[in-house]
Amino acid sequence: MATAWERAKRALATRLCVREPRVRAAAEEEERGRSAAASPHARVSSRRLSRSGSRSSTKICAICLGGMWSGSGQTLFTAECSHKFHFHCVSSSVRHGNTVCPICRAVWKELPLQGLLPAADALDDRQQQQQMAVVRRLSRADSVTRQWQLPIFRTLDGSIFDDDEQLDLQPENVVASQDVDAMAASLDIDAMVDSVGITTYTAFPAMEESVTEEEFAILIHLKAPSSPTSATSRAPLDLVTVLDVSWSMAGTKLALLKRAMSFVIQTLGPRDRLSVVTFSSSARRLFPLRRMTESGRQHALQRVNSLVADGGTNIADAMKKAARVMEDRLERNPVCSIVLLSDGRDTYNVPGPRGGGQPDYAVLVPSSVLAGGPSRHAQVHAFGFGADHDSAAMHTIAEISGGTFSFIDTAGSIQDAFAQCIGGLLSVVAQELRLTVECDDDGVLLTSVRSGGYTSHVDGDGRGGFIDVGDLYADEERDFLVTVRVPAARGESVLITPSCTYRNTVTMETVRVEGDTVTVPRTVDPVSSDMAPEVERELHRVQATEDMAAARAAAEQGDFKLAVAILDERRLVLESRAAALHEDLQSVALVAELTEMQDRVETRQRYEESGRAYMLAGLSSHSWQRATARGDSTELTSVIHTYQTPFMVDMLQRSQTLQPEVVVAMNRSPTLVSPSRIAASPPTRRSVRLTRSFPGRHS
């Protein structure tokens, strides 16, 4: 009989897919023959085991339900009970204490040795193929001893992701001097001609001659051009989705996440590229940035549908992998972004609170995605899912990167929340936009800039300043309040001249737009104290946002009565002004939002369950003046969300329309929805009317 040491070596050889030397194999075969001759019962048992193994041999991994193909570069593991599984599936299962075969329930005694190799679920397809190639080369050397002397897999660098698929540079996208007519025919001319619009409003229509105003308010309103009408004339997207597949996502949550990802995959076009990073106790890249052609979609759908939930929550490791995917790209689409979804808390990297305050969540954000860092960094749009996620951590990740934080209250709203976000990312028309303000008359000085989350600067001499706005989605709008010191004067005061520069994502040209010079007449007559409605509306929004932040700070200190009082006071002010402004819609929307926040902050339990996440999503929305998901999908189209664009609303309606079909299709085929059906779905008139009726936006 074989000794325990020989059995251990055979088990390891099976795990590494390595042949043992023929001499040793022949000797053991002879020994097995002698044993069989001595025991007829053993011979019968052997035949039964062989037949049983043959019957259960299948091309489906019983752990992830994904396909297994011999010779395709997949690492397979054959257990002692003869059942086969993906190596990364069984090693992950064993790592978390599961030593029972999921098919026959046999207790395994010979297990994969994880200490010698990197976790297989941390490798993607390309790296697993490289891993198998190394093993095959060693097996041809016909020496088991040599395997122990070489660091077989440590030579593979899993931290470099320069294998992104080459961009599809169609002739219409490469412009030569003789191809001007072809370019005009293939691109949306309106998207090339239209530019960002600049409109200004002064707080009051005139000023008295003898008055020196220290803080005269001016509203600067930006409006992005409309979205290109064809898929070939919009800017293509590089997207990395970072998905939580820890044990808490098992069951319905994971099924709905797969459905949401299927919608994203089918929505992306052949010029867009997608990479998926999943994480539990460690992070794993499912596949590199790949164009969403027909074959690319099929591959992505298969990999997403094979996901299983297990392990802990390691957000930092996942963010590092996603950041490296963006950093190491050999080719780059004009628009790039990272979408992060988690329902839990990072249990591996977040240190304790600093001085009794919040933990240092900045450790979760790689330096390459910091806002204000290298040009065209990847923003992270974070989605906190359920009552147990760490909303403070997710909000910090989004805020540091310049992205938005959304709160998903119910599992059924994941797809709608993703759809709204993708609707924005697929309609970026301006990048690296900087709004510049220059003072004109002598004595006119720029005193402050209210820019929310955007970086702003006022020159030391007060003669100018700027706001870095970054990207704008199609039809998106931004409002910024600036104040200037205006000295006494006669006739007319020339105050400021706004302008902006940005890169057009369709033509990739730098565009400069000059706004009209802002002037205010001087008069000897008293001036009305009624502020311009556009300026007053924005002032109320800024003040309401500041009160939301103050209420959240009070709630974090445990003073929930104070938090409710702060919100209630602002609500009463807005209600009175809404009536004065003839039912101003933005004020009505803010009242509804503040009322909802009051309800969610009344008690510690309510605040911990959903109040904190709801308030942080609201603060993120107002800080960037961009739509975020809050609560369930029925609220996404409510009046509270004042920043939705027509393309966002259209994408959201497609999601809500396709959801019933997707559920049925999930039970039939990995191809959930025909790509042509999504691409052919026209925008609806209702979506345009809904968006235009949103408050606080100007034509």
Image (cartoon, rainbow, N blue to C red):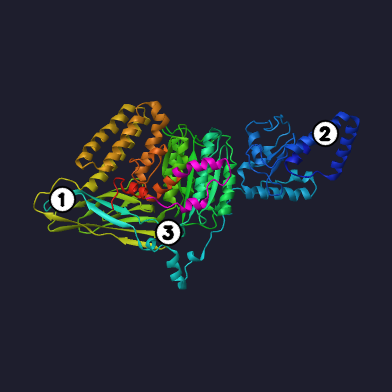
Tell me the quarter of the picture where residue 87 sits.
Answer: top right
Residue at image position (15%, 45%) is: 529
Q: Which residue has dot 2 on it?
A: 46
Residue 108, percent across and down?
72, 31
Name the kind of residue labelled 3 in the image.
Thr
Q: Which residue has dot 3 on it?
A: 505
Q: Which residue has dot 1 on it?
A: 212
The answer to whether 186 appears left or right of 621 in the picture is right
The answer to whether marks 3 and 1 mark residues whose Cβ atoms lie closer than 8 Å is no
Select label 3 or label 1 by which is in front. 3
Tell me if residue 673 is in the magenta stretch.
yes
Tell me the quarter of the picture where residue 506 sits.
Answer: bottom left
Name the kind of residue labelled 2 in the image.
Ser
Mark yes or no: residue 94 visible.
yes
Identify the element where label 1 is drawn.
loop
The quarter of the picture where the N terminus appears is top right
Identify the element where label 3 is drawn.
loop
Residue at image position (51%, 36%) is: 346
Residue 364, percent across and down?
49, 41
Identify the element where label 2 is drawn.
helix
Spatial CA distance of label 3 from label 1 is 44 Å
Label 2, residues with CA under 10 Å away: few <14, some 14-19, many ≥20: few
Name the kind of residue labelled 1 in the image.
Thr
Select label 2 or label 3 by which is in front. 2
Label 1, residues with CA under 10 Å away: few <14, some 14-19, many ≥20: some
Residue interval drawn in magenta: 656-684
Sequence-first tag of 3 and 1: 1
Residue at image position (25%, 38%) is: 574
Spatial CA distance of label 1 from label 2 is 101 Å
